[in-house]
């Protein structure tokens, strides 16, 4: 397949199946939090249920077999000297690690890749012939769909509609790739602006080339909130599922925080990390619709 935006959305709709969240034993803390003028979300594990708990973290199953099958199904052929027993999925992961290491040498502690660039390197090394950018996008998305099943959490659309009706500016800070916003739009059958998200407040890791828990991502969001709406970080509630990557990092930039503790797959308490051992989010929710309790009237 090619990788135009409509085709990517259709791919998520075709390959995705409902995923049930797995309840946790974390107690919600839902007292009203005054002074909140904006809400910013994480995506994977917060808005979208991920089969592996985050984006592209799967190490289980026969990923090499899946990758070889996908290459064959899309009409690609391995170079003769690469048509061996080598684990191609591991080779792909090594390309990501190499890119991260290169960024580390330039002083970037938490780098992010552009996954289409990584697939381009993979195809150049292992696959015969040339492939254009659009086909790389389509291949990258289908591989992600197959290794990391995703589905919106219950109440997502209704929660966004409620926040939009209250004219609360909505934003995102998330580890993501190009297909992540298209995934949300595919599931909810509306564009991000139609869902209430301010396009000026969408901070994606792959665009910044920084990954969580980089505080710079949250500082970037703080600047955008102030520029677009005159909103300070302490007037914004950041909602995420990871005590380090979401709660700790957002607090470093001055945000108020809500831990989403609605799914065992994605909940990351990080109790063995000194940065999180005594860290308490401002609020804790077990379902997205509980945000209304926190925001009050």
Image (cartoon, rainbow, N blue to C red):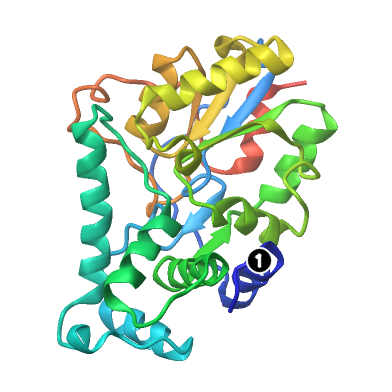
Q: Is residue 73 above or below residue 28?
A: below
Location of residue 197 in the rendering, given as x and y in whole percent from the top left corner: 71, 37
Residue placed at 55% from the left, 23% from the top?
221
- Horizontal arrangement in the rendering, residue 185 relative to residue 175 (left or right): right
60, 199: nearer the viewer: 199
Tell which residue pokes out farthest to the right in this image.
165
Tell which residue pokes out farthest to the front in this image.
129
Residue placed at 23% from the left, 24% from the top?
277
Location of residue 281 in the rendering, given as x and y in whole percent from the top left corner: 43, 23
Location of residue 135 in the rendering, given as x and y in whole percent from the top left corner: 53, 72
Q: Is residue 247 above or below residue 223?
A: below
221, 167: nearer the viewer: 221
Residue designated by label 1: 4
Q: Is residue 46 above or below residue 36?
A: below
Q: Look at the image and tell me whether residue 160 can be seen.
A: yes
Residue placed at 76% from the left, 38% from the top?
196
SS at badge 1: loop
Q: On the image, which quarter does residue 1 sit in?
A: bottom right
Residue placed at 73% from the left, 15% from the top?
229
- Horizontal arrangement in the rendering, residue 168 relative to residue 177 (left or right): right
């Amino acid at each position: 397949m090619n990788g135009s935006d409509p085709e990517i959305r259709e791919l998520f709709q075709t390959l995705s199946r409902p995923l049930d969240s797995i309840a946790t034993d974390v107690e919600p803390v839902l007292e009203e939090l005054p002074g909140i003028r904006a809400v910013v979300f994480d995506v994977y594990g917060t808005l979208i249920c991920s089969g592996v708990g985050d984006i592209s973290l799967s190490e289980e199953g026969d990923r090499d077999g899946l990758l070889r099958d996908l290459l064959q199904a899309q009409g690609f052929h391995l170079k003769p000297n690469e048509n061996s027993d080598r684990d191609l999925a591991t080779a792909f992961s090594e390309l990501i690690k190499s890119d991260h290491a290169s960024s580390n040498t330039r002083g970037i502690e938490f780098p992010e890749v552009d996954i289409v660039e990584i697939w381009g390197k993979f195809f150049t090394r292992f696959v015969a012939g040339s492939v254009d950018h659009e086909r790389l996008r389509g291949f990258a998305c289908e591989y992600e769909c197959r290794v990391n099943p995703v589905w919106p959490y219950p109440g997502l659309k209704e929660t966004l509609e409620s926040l939009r009706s209250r004219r609360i500016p909505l934003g995102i800070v998330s580890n993501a790739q190009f297909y992540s916003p298209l995934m949300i739009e595919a599931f909810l059958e509306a564009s991000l602006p139609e869902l209430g998200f301010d396009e000026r407040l969408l901070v994606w890791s792959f665009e910044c080339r920084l990954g969580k828990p980089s505080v710079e991502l949250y500082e970037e969001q703080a600047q955008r909130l102030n520029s677009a709406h005159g909103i300070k970080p302490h007037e914004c509630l950041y909602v995420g599922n990871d005590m380090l990557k979401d709660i700790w990092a957002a607090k470093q930039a001055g945000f108020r925080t809500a831990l989403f503790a609605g799914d065992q797959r994605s909940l990351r308490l990080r109790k063995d990390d000194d940065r999180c051992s005594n860290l308490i989010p401002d609020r804790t929710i077990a379902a997205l619709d509980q945000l209304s309790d926190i925001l009050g009237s």
